[in-house]
Amino acid sequence: QVQLVESGGGLVQPGGSLRLTCAGSGRTFSGYAMGWFRQAPGKDREFVAVVSWSGGNADYAGSVKGRFGISRDNTKNTLYLQMNSLKPEDTAVYYCAARLGSTKWDWYEYDYWGRGTQVTVSS
């Protein structure tokens, strides 16, 4: 059974940084695109960033471009999200997800999900 487990969330002040990690197990993610999504209270789940299997192609939501960086280590079945210059509006539960094939921005295109990690940006 495929499992994705996120970690690294927490409380951080505006302007601070966090690094999220998503550890995959249960299978190799060869050929799988992986992404980060987030959901704030009362809002829909939204796309944050996605990276191709090779790591050579990455896309970002406009609201995080230039501040967040997505990467993966396929030898460790691990996905990362480096978040810099955090803002209060980045507060949400962050989820990692995986899908076989190309990168997609729509959350419903993804087959496997973690349970999420809370990120709170507040002074």
Image: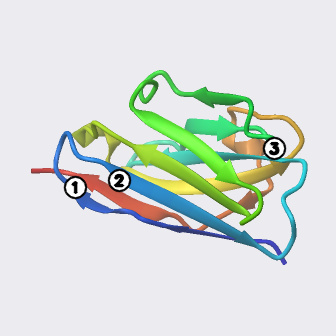
Within 10 Å of disc 2 (Cα), the crowding (few <14, some 14-19, many 20+) is some
Please report the residue visible at 57 percent of the width from the left and 41 percent of the height from the top: 70
99 left or right, relative to 72: right
Tag 1 and tag 2, C-beta contact below 8 Å:
yes
- Residue 55 locus on image (x, y percent): 73, 39
Residue found at the far front of this picture: 75
Q: Nearer the viewer, residue 24 or 108?
A: 24
Q: Secondary structure at mark 1?
A: strand
Identify whether 14 is placed above or below 12.
above
120 left or right, relative to 22: left
From the image, tell me which residue sits under label 2: 18
Please report the residue visible at 30 percent of the width from the left and 48 percent of the height from the top: 17
Q: Amino acid at mark 3?
A: Trp
Q: Earlier in the sequence, mark 1 or mark 3?
A: 1
Note whether residue 41 is visible: no
Distance between mark 1 and mark 3 Cα atoms: 30 Å
- Residue 58 locus on image (x, y percent): 66, 31
Within 10 Å of disc 3 (Cα), the crowding (few <14, some 14-19, many 20+) is many
From the image, tell me which residue sits under label 1: 12
Q: Image quadrant for the N terminus?
A: bottom right
Please report the residue visible at 58 percent of the width from the left and 47 percent of the height from the top: 36
From the image, tell me which residue sits under label 3: 53
Q: Amino acid at mark 1?
A: Val
Mark on residue 48? Answer: none
Q: Nearer the viewer, residue 91 or 18?
A: 18
14 left or right, relative to 9: left
Q: Secondary structure at mark 2?
A: strand
